[in-house]
Amino acid sequence: MRLRFAFTISLVVLAAAAGLRAQSQSQTKTPEAGIQVTTAQLTGEVVQVEGNQLLMRMQPDKSLRYFDVQPGRQFTIDGQKKLIGDLKPGTILTATVVTKTQPITVRTTTVTNGTVWYVQGNFVILRLPNGDTREYNVPESFKFTVNDKPASVSELRKGMKVSGTRIVEEPTTEMSEQTVVTGTAPK
């Protein structure tokens, strides 16, 4: 596990490539039960500081670890806020990393408007308002909107103005990490 000195949030969103493409698109995130919180602690002694680079001797195994510290990162040493340039060899640092992992569902809603250029079976070609054409293979159960009424692909005819809405739900995980570094100066 790599120690990170900065708060990071990452979000991985997987979107389905098939089906209707975006003309207008919106996303919502719905949290689910099952938040996991893990806490890890790393302790080491400052060996060398140069700029934003920090070399530590980790405890208890005495291995050396290098860290590139984010500019402006604060450390609490003997109760006082310090910057990396204030650290001296022999300072003992303890980093407490709290990681929260939460499963979420990302719902992507895509609305496409266009004019039917060709239709046969479940295959439809639409001319979009910007002049582009798009091909779609849609399931028989898919409903378009024509004149504010639902219409199946079998009801479409060349020249009809249609709107199609596709909703894709993808499970993903949202992770946040917060690190607090405290320490004691050498005596």
Image: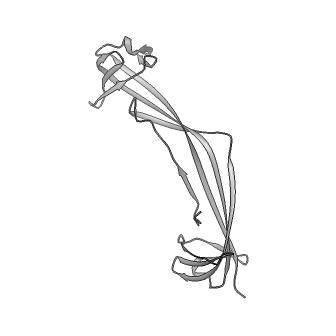
Where 10 sits versus 66, above or below? above
Q: What count of labels does the image hold?
A: 0
Q: Quadrant of the C terminus?
A: bottom right
Q: Residue furthest top?
A: 155
Left-right relation of 53 to 36: left
| Residue found 68% across the figure and 49% down from its top | 36
Left-right relation of 111 to 159: right
Percent position of residue 109, x then y: 48, 32
Q: Quadrant of residue 183?
A: bottom right
Left-right relation of 143 to 175: left
Percent position of residue 151, x then y: 42, 14
Q: Residue furthest front?
A: 61
Where 4 sits versus 23, above or below? below
The coloring applied to the image is one colour
Where 124 sits versus 41, above or below? above
| Residue found 35% across the figure and 14% down from its top | 156
Q: Quadrant of the N terminus?
A: bottom right
Along the line of sight, the residue nearer the viewer: 163 or 18: 18
Where 124 sits versus 169, above or below? above
| Residue found 70% across the figure and 86% down from its top | 186
Percent position of residue 19, x then y: 40, 29
Percent position of residue 140, x then y: 43, 16
Q: Quadrant of residue 124?
A: top left
